[in-house]
Image (cartoon, rainbow, N blue to C red):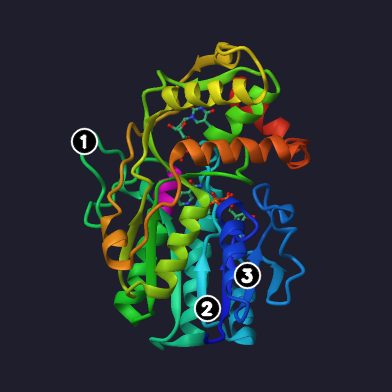
Amino acid sequence: MISKKILITGGAGFIGSHVVRLFVNKYPDYEIVNLDKLTYAGNLENLRDIEKNPNYRFIKGDIVDAPSMLKLFNEENFDGVIHLAAESHVDRSLENPNEFVMTNIIGTVNLLQAALKSWGNDPSKRFYHISTDEVYGSIDGGLFTEHTSIDPQSPYSSSKAGSDHFVKAFHNSYKLPVLISRCSNNYGPNHFPEKLIPLMINNILENKQLPVYGKGENIRDWLYVEDHASAIDAIFHKGKTGEVYNIGGNNEWRNIDLVNFLCSLMDKKLDRAEGTSAKLITYVKDRPGHDLRYAIDSSKLQNDLGWSPSLTFEVGLERTVDWYLNNKEWLSHVTSGQYKEYYTQMYNKR
Ligand code: NAD
Ligand code: TYD
């Protein structure tokens, strides 16, 4: 195995922590450097099991700070970057879009500049940008392919689309060896309870209302987070530079059906009578500009790189619920303080 030094940005977040864990455990000869600002979404508790591994190192840093990114790349001589650091929540982007422009666009351009200064167009290097299917906008029928036009609708997806364009521009203009992947909605352990599934799990545990936006008819495709991490591994090692790869679970759910399914699973797990949790469902004011449906075609990744999801949604959701039930301390830490303020601000006006 060839030894490599890889920078993973945003490795203390939900998906990033699963990617860091996979790389640290699967590639003991690699040196994995995790750079994270530790915003509200970054949590070193996500990495307790691997933090003492000799091939792992954490750096607290901000990708918006251009001089320190240049210095870091100068000092470290990375072989590759897997860039996950981002502001990631649509509802927050509607309240504070500037933060999304700063981290998702400016932060990504800072990393691109630092990589270009350090690497030039050395084809052995890899700058891998983790993006989202939300850049394609909403689709009524059919599936997003890698050729679907970019048509973002929210401040979050617009900032991700902006960063995707810059990544492509650095490939077109300077031959920086880049890769981009666009994945559908992830779920699984360590998911911050501002997103649909962990928020509903937390509220069911606390006997709080389950706020379903609008009529609950919006559709998302859901993928278990470890399957996203294994796709990232495949693309980082086998993907063709300059290319985009879609990643998806082939697993579309209407929000209301998903919430009902989760309610009955939680009733079983908590030994409550069937129907107890579903009584908490409350329809609330819709999200402005709420994308109706995301649905993704990941056949390029499946055919070219041999990846496929390993879990059904039923198995993945049960694993997720079990993780939250077995990690109540994690949940109580992340839902204390700031989270309470966020929840009041976001949901009291709905
Ligand atoms: P997350 O919000 O859980 O984690 C983001 C991480 O980035 C946190 O650890 C945070 O501290 C860090 N971060 C934020 N700003 C930073 C900065 N300025 N400098 C350094 N670190 C910073 O997000 P996630 O859900 O794990 O998503 C990770 C990536 O995957 C994002 O780029 C997101 O757009 C993309 N993505 C997410 C999903 C999903 O369903 N969650 C789906 C597709 C793509
Ligand atoms: P979310 O997890 O925020 O992901 P995204 O908006 O990036 O797809 O939301 C998933 C879906 O669930 C989306 O259609 C909005 C909806 N939703 C609710 O109905 N209630 C909630 O409290 C949240 C957070 C989301």
Say whether mark 3 is within 8 Å of ligand 1.
no
Residue type marked 3: Val
Per the image, the residue denoted by label 1 is 141
- Could you tell me how far apart the alpha carbons at marks 3 and 1 are, in whole angstroms? 40 Å
- Is residue 86 shown in magenta? no
Residue type marked 1: Gly
Q: Is residue 56 left or right of residue 319?
A: right
Residue type marked 2: Ala
Residue neighbourhood size for the residue with mark 1, other residues' Cα within 10 Å, grouped as few (<14), some (14–19), many (≥20) = few
Residue neighbourhood size for the residue with mark 3, other residues' Cα within 10 Å, grouped as few (<14), some (14–19), many (≥20) = many
Q: Is 196 in front, or is 76? A: 196
Q: Position of residue 97 (x, y in %)?
A: 51, 45
Residue at 73%, 77% (x, y): give it: 54
Residue at 61%, 17% (x, y): give it: 209
Give the vertical position of 299 relative to 333 (above or below).
below
Residue at 71%, 31% (x, y): give it: 341
Q: Position of residue 16 (x, y in %)?
A: 58, 58
Q: Which element carries disc 1, helix, strand or loop?
A: loop
Q: Foreground mark, 2 or 1?
A: 1
Q: Foreground mark, 3 or 1?
A: 3
Give the vertical position of 244 relative to 241 (above or below).
above
Per the image, the residue denoted by label 2 is 114
Q: Which element carries disc 3, helix, strand or loop?
A: helix
Per the image, the residue denoted by label 3 is 24
Which residue range is magenta in the image? 155-160
Residue neighbourhood size for the residue with mark 2, other residues' Cα within 10 Å, grouped as few (<14), some (14–19), many (≥20) = many
